[in-house]
Amino acid sequence: MKKEKKSGKTLKAIAIVLGILILAALGIGYYFTRTALLNEKETQYLYIDRDDNIDSVYAKVSAIAKPHAMKGFKALADFRGYADNIIRGRYGVDTKMSANGLFNMLKRGEQTPLNVPIPSVRTMDKLAAAVGKKLELDSTELYHALTDEKVCQRYGYTLETIPSMFIPDSYNMYWTVTVDEFLDRMKKEHERYWNEERLAKAKALDMTPTEVSTLASIVTEETAATQEKPTVAGLYINRLRKGMLLQSDPTVKFAMHDFTIRRILNRMLTTDDPYNTYKYKGLPPGPIRIPLKEDLEAVLNYEHHDYIYMCAKEDFSGTHNYARNEAEHAANARRYHQALNARGIR
């Protein structure tokens, strides 16, 4: 009888202990997998870079995590040896993610890609700086690559023509992309843009994609008015076909490396530089900036007309007066210069 009572008490004790363990396990499971990690009400991004160690990762996580969730994350990281395998990257932590979810994402290196805009800029140092602000890669390293003749040749370009490889847009990529991976991606995007239809249009113009890009860069600089871009493109195509100097003011600014010039003076037109289209016939050696997409399209789908001259309108609207002959152009230019003088622009 006593043995039976003892046995019963033992079983009851075991049952109680098991119950406690089960409840604890359920509690821990809920603690790690069900409780939302974030303190914030919207997705946060963790940037784990090449210099991070376990302590700095903890510091970054704790900056966005609830205290009890942070304990759960640390327990998992310690138990599973995360300190020995920290993977760099940009990680999106959404509002429903648990400590376990974050740990698994970091442990597996499941990065969240981001949109990297390629801007229409005049120089490669500006491009490198803009990209460097969005990605982990060193902007100086990217600039050195873009100004390295051998690197440019590898992609089929020269130092002068490399800007034409870039098509302004936003591209989805990982924060940890390397310089080589970035350039490879840009080359692929260039090839994707230049499909059969666009290549056929360029061929009809007797131009290569790089030459289209060079002319489009002049259009980008000449006007911000979308509606007149095909007109401007058509004008320069007319001049090219007639063997005339392009006489584009923005190419003078580029030749002088001074983009602050507000008024092109006669003495500037003699600048001895292959980019100066007042002095040298044909297209300049390469784009004077990365042209906008709409300007590439403006060249490929240029407006057919007889204009060979253009002059900024005297109302400073950013648009132009066009002319078919020198007399018309002289009248347009006179009005514009009078407006400049009236405003004291020198």
Image (cartoon, rainbow, N blue to C red):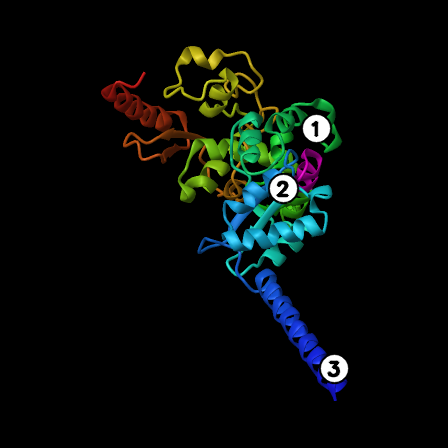
Instruction: Check disc 3: other Cα within 10 Å, few if <14, some if 14-19, many if 20+.
Output: few
The residue indicated by pointer 3 is 7
Name the residue: 49% across, 11% down.
270
Label 1: which secondary element:
helix
Q: Is 1 above or below relative to 96?
A: below
- Mark 1 or 3, nearer chain start: 3
Residue type highlighted by circle 2 = Ala
Residue 247 appears at what percent x and percent y? Answer: 48, 23
- Depth check, front residue: 182 or 328: 182
Instruction: Write down the region rendered in magenta.
Output: 175-187
- Mark 3 or 2, nearer chain start: 3
Label 2: which secondary element:
helix
Q: Measure how far apart labels 1 and 2 are at the Cα level.
A: 22 Å
Residue 274 appears at what percent x and percent y? Answer: 58, 18
Q: Is 43 above or below relative to 123?
A: below
Specify whether 180 is left or right of 43: right
Instruction: Check disc 2: other Cα within 10 Å, few if <14, some if 14-19, many if 20+.
Output: many
Residue 234 appears at what percent x and percent y? Answer: 50, 38
Name the residue: 47% across, 20% down.
253
Instruction: Check disc 1: other Cα within 10 Å, few if <14, some if 14-19, many if 20+.
Output: many
Dominant SS of magenta comes to helix
The residue indicated by pointer 1 is 152
Q: Is residue 267 visible?
A: yes
Q: Is residue 300 visible?
A: no
Residue type highlighted by circle 3 = Ser
